[in-house]
Amino acid sequence: MHKLSDLDTVLIDALEHASEAFAIYDAELNLVHCNSNFRKLYSYTVEQTRPGTPVLDLLKLDIENGNLPVGFDACNPEKYIKRRRDFSRLRGETFEIQLQNGQWLSINEGNTASGGLVSIQRDITDSKRTEEEFRKAADLFRTAFNADDSARSITVLETGQFIDVNRAWCALRGIERKDVIGKTAYELNVWGGTENRNLLIDVIREQKQGGVLETRITRKNKEKRNVILSWQVVFFEGEECLFLSSRDVTDLRRVEAAQRESDRLLRVMFENAPIGLALYESEKYSLVLANQRYREITGIEDENASGLDWRNLTHPDDLERELVQHQRFLKGETDEYQLEKRYVHPDGTVRLAQVSLVSVQKVTPDDALRHLAMLTDITDRKETELALQVSQERFSDFTRVGTEWYWEMDQEMNYTYLSSAVEKSLGLPESDYIGLSYLDFKGENEDLQEAEKIMIQKCKAHESFSELVIYRRHNQTNNKVWLRVNGYPFFDEMGAFAGYRGSSSDITEQVELEERLQQAQKMEVVGQLSGGIAHDFNNLLGVIQGNAELAKEKIELGVDDSLQHLSAILRAADRGAELTQSMLAFSRKQALNPTSIRLDEQIRQMEQMIRSAIGEQVLLSTSFEKELWHCEVDPGKVENVVLNLCINAKDAMYDGGELILRLKNSTLKEEDLVNLPDIEPGRYVALEVEDSGVGMPEDIIDHVFEPFFTTKEIGKGTGLGLSMVYGFARQSRGFVDIQSEEEKGTLVTVYLPCAKR
């Protein structure tokens, strides 16, 4: 047991008569001495508080007497003693506790130089303001006054003169105690100005009982510091004084401000992060906090969804798979995991997300296990990947089974890609083309085809081309392989020319079929033509032969009556000449005398002739463009064309109708002449003849330009009219277009080239 010195004895004797409860413990927390007020406060007997009594024994008595702090764990008094000792060692300031019986105690504890503990306690149930009376004991007051790092001072309330300050006060203000005592707060400029202390005094005089406030003080070096003041009005030597206990919170406020700003920035980043973020209580599966993106991905509609179970958000088919990984996480086998899973929204929408889960470090061992869930919505990406996969598979299937193959060339027109179908078409695998140009596969003595020249020109100009028909040689058989080629230039992200992409279709079978069909059609036309010519000439020869025989007989008989027979022979010869002229027109071998004329003027001169030819049952109307271009045609032959078309139109209107003649300027481009490669783009005069007759079906339209083809009754047409129109138009470097629909009429348009003036 610790032996008391004479000084200790004197001190104990003095404290025995103090009004506060007082106890002294040695370094092992054994009681050295306590006064009667301490025993009275806790209902201890003298026997129970003999020197050397362990504080744990006193605590057990408190458990029996019910003198326990609220929230005290009776099953673990050692832990309480340790925490109480640690608190006193670290803080060493006055604190208040409430006992379970409702009694309030004010406790001030401090460490002695020998490592012991001085505990000063008083009952403040009726009044907490008795603390100042306790501090009148000078030595104990000094211990308490300097017990911790709180800056304390006592000044005369009225004048601000300092009676005493502790070490912490001196350290806070950067001044020694000897330079403070006896001087006023105004002289030391503690408050940074007279008005600041006056404001504080006004507050104190209004409240009297004491309080806490935060303010700023000025150090000796003019530095401003933030402090929290606890104040109390006390009386010292009959004079009203001010007791201030202040704590420097300048650094704390800076840290708090920085923490608030950091928290604000983190909150902004958290809430506006492009990925979903959420904090969960791992073992409870419950949501603590989630940002906007997380709520969007998972379908959480309530911004305050704290406590939500993530299992209820997960697609049922994905839940079991994740729970397996989550159990490993809870057992500590892993501190993170990743997976892809689906979230089901309240409206039934399903979103697919890439989930990364990581554990959150505990602040204390008792903290609950938490984890951070990070979500990236990959629904659109997966749909795009799936669509791309399907597209690639579809493209691959098409290239395998079709006759079309695709290619790509770089800026130098060297192949960089070809689909596999090229081998089936040209007999050479796609790999053999890579790095070589189109011209590398041309024969040494093989001239460029017209379509190839166009393609090369387009490539040099970085222009697209389409529907070019060329032939290549099969690598093994050397046979012609006809191709329809399309290509377009492509450019990089900077707009620079990067090469060409295109397709080539093997149309060999189609070309060969068309050639056979054309040959068959030619033979059919030749047969039809020769049959028609033979028939007509046979009729003419019959007329000539019959009339010649009759004329011969009459001459032999001496009858001078052969003139009519000779006239019939001449008419038959004239008819033969006309037939020959029609055949020459169809074959485009008739003699033409083209000149520059205005068709509107030409047709106005023959309008009366046309009206006579079509009769009164047909209403004739005209529509001519005012500034009609001149065209270069044979005037006589064009009159025959107009009359021929008008008579054909009249014959198609059995009960009369309307015939419209139109003349207008027309500029034709390449795309307008796709099916007429031998017709040059440019300016044309369009002659339109439209009737309201019976019209024609499509199968008839396909044959109307063939010689001797007619839909008229026998004896009403030779079938050479439209073929003559067709031959004249083509010989004049123009063409004919016909449109017709049954029961709605026919429109024939003759395009004649504009005169070069």
Image: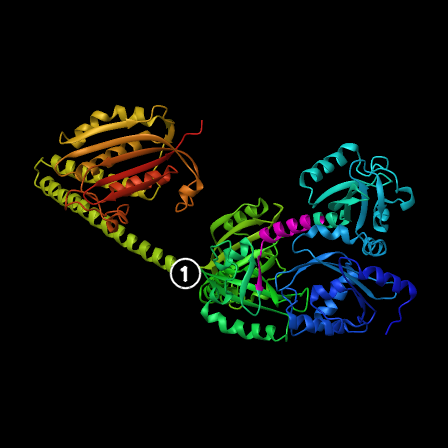
226 with respect to 695 (left or right): right
Instruction: Residue 518: give x, y in percent of width and height.
Output: 35, 55
User: Does the magenta-highlighted stretch encompass residue 269?
Assistant: yes
Disc 1 is placed on an element classified as loop
Q: Is residue 133 visible?
A: yes
Tell me which corner region of the image, top left, top right, bottom left or bottom right, holds residue 685: top left
Is residue 396 depicted above or below 331 in this figure?
above
Indicate the amino acid at tag 1: Gly
Instruction: Residue 396: give x, y in percent of width and height.
Output: 49, 65
Instruction: Residue 229: give x, y in percent of width and height.
Output: 74, 46
On-image quarter of the N terminus: bottom right
| Dominant SS type (magenta) | helix
Is residue 142 depicted above or below 62 in this figure?
above
Instruction: Residue 677: give x, y in percent of width and height.
Output: 42, 45
Tell me which corner region of the image, top left, top right, bottom left or bottom right, holds residue 671: top left
Q: Residues within 10 Å of mark 1 (few under 14, many from 20)?
A: few
Residue at x 29%, y 39% (from the top left corner): 725
359 with respect to 23 (left or right): left
Of residue 491 and residue 188, the one placed in the foreground of this image is 188
Residue at x 26%, y 23% (from the top left corner): 605
Q: Which region is colored magenta?
A: 258-280
What residue is shown with label 1? 348
On-image quarter of the C terminus: top left
User: Does the magenta-highlighted stretch encompass residue 179?
Assistant: no
391 with respect to 288 (left or right): left
